[in-house]
Image (spheres, grey):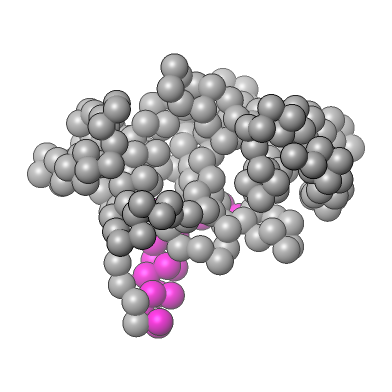
């Protein structure tokens, strides 16, 4: 553990994104930075993930939110970012696309189930739930979450549940949580340029499908 290096990197990122904020909002960003430093001392965060959280936090703060990172929202769930503005709140989960060695042979199914489980589990704890990912990665967004809950078919919800059951049994993903889950947006994070841009889920799927088609890859 290199606390001095972690602090230096956090201060560098906050300095880079500070120009997105008004002077009165800088304390909100500094608060996030201090939270991350405290968590690093407890060996709870790493710098690569923390950089993504800081850039997302700056975007939220610029839009009037107060932000906390690594916030506990249930007995078993800790979210990456929890932001509040007025009576509304939002949760953002950052997805880097990492696949553990145990799933080297089923990376797509595993990644898809992980995305499904995050949407189903977290979205009930906020008014808006979003995913975030670095710009160099493509995350699979199941199309069931592009349509409103009342329009989802039982057989499609069961398909999602069956896939999640392969990877998540303790606790399992509930049928009703999948049925009622909502995805508000996907944030694309450009670390080199120090900004995050939110896309609506359909816009993200349209964009990634075009990229996959051009590269002759499908999922």
Q: Nearer the viewer, residue 130 or 38?
A: 38
Left or right of residue 204: residue 196: right
Left or right of residue 205: residue 126: right
Quadrant (top left, top right, bottom left, bottom right) of the C terminus: bottom left
Furthest residue to the top? Answer: 75
Residue plotted at (20% across, 31% down): 175
Q: Nearer the viewer, residue 204 or 134?
A: 134
In the image, residue 123 sits, relative to residue 100, either above or below, namely: above
- Measured as percent of width and height from the top left, residue 206 is found at 39, 66
Furthest residue to the left? Answer: 155
Quadrant (top left, top right, bottom left, bottom right) of the N terminus: top right
Magenta stretch: dominant SS? Answer: helix
Left or right of residue 163: residue 188: right
Residue plotted at (82% across, 33% down): 30
User: Residue 150 occupies which quadrant of the picture?
Assistant: top left
- Measured as percent of width and height from the top left, residue 39 is found at 69, 29
Q: Is residue 97 visible?
A: yes
In the image, residue 70 sits, relative to residue 93, either above or below, namely: above
Q: Nearer the viewer, residue 12 or 178?
A: 12
User: Residue 122 occupies which quadrant of the picture?
Assistant: top left
Q: Is residue 160 visible?
A: no
Which region of the structure is painted magenta?
197-215
In the image, residue 142 sits, relative to residue 181, either above or below, namely: below
Could you tell me how many numbered marks the image carries?
0
């Amino acid at each position: 553990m290199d606390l001095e290096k972690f602090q230096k990197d956090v201060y560098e990122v906050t300095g880079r994104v500070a120009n997105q904020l008004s002077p009165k909002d800088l304390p909100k960003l500094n608060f996030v930075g201090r939270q991350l430093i405290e968590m690093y001392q407890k060996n709870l965060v790493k710098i690569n993930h923390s950089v993504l959280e800081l850039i997302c936090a700056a975007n939220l703060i610029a839009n009037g939110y107060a932000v906390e990172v690594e916030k506990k929202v249930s007995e078993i769930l800790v979210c990456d970012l929890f932001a509040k503005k007025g009576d509304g709140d939002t949760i953002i989960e950052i997805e880097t696309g990492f696949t553990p060695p145990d799933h080297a042979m089923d990376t797509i199914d595993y990644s898809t189930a992980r995305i499904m489980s995050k949407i189903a589990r977290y979205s009930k704890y906020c008014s808006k739930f979003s995913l975030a990912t670095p710009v160099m990665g493509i995350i699979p967004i199941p199309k069931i979450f592009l349509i409103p809950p009342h329009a989802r078919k039982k057989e499609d919800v069961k398909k999602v549940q069956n896939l999640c059951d392969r990877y998540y049994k303790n606790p399992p993903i509930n049928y009703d949580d999948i049925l009622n889950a909502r995805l508000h947006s996907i944030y694309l994070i450009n670390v080199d340029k120090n900004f995050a841009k939110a896309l609506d889920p359909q816009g993200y799927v349209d964009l990634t499908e075009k990229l996959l088609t051009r590269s002759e890859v499908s999922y």
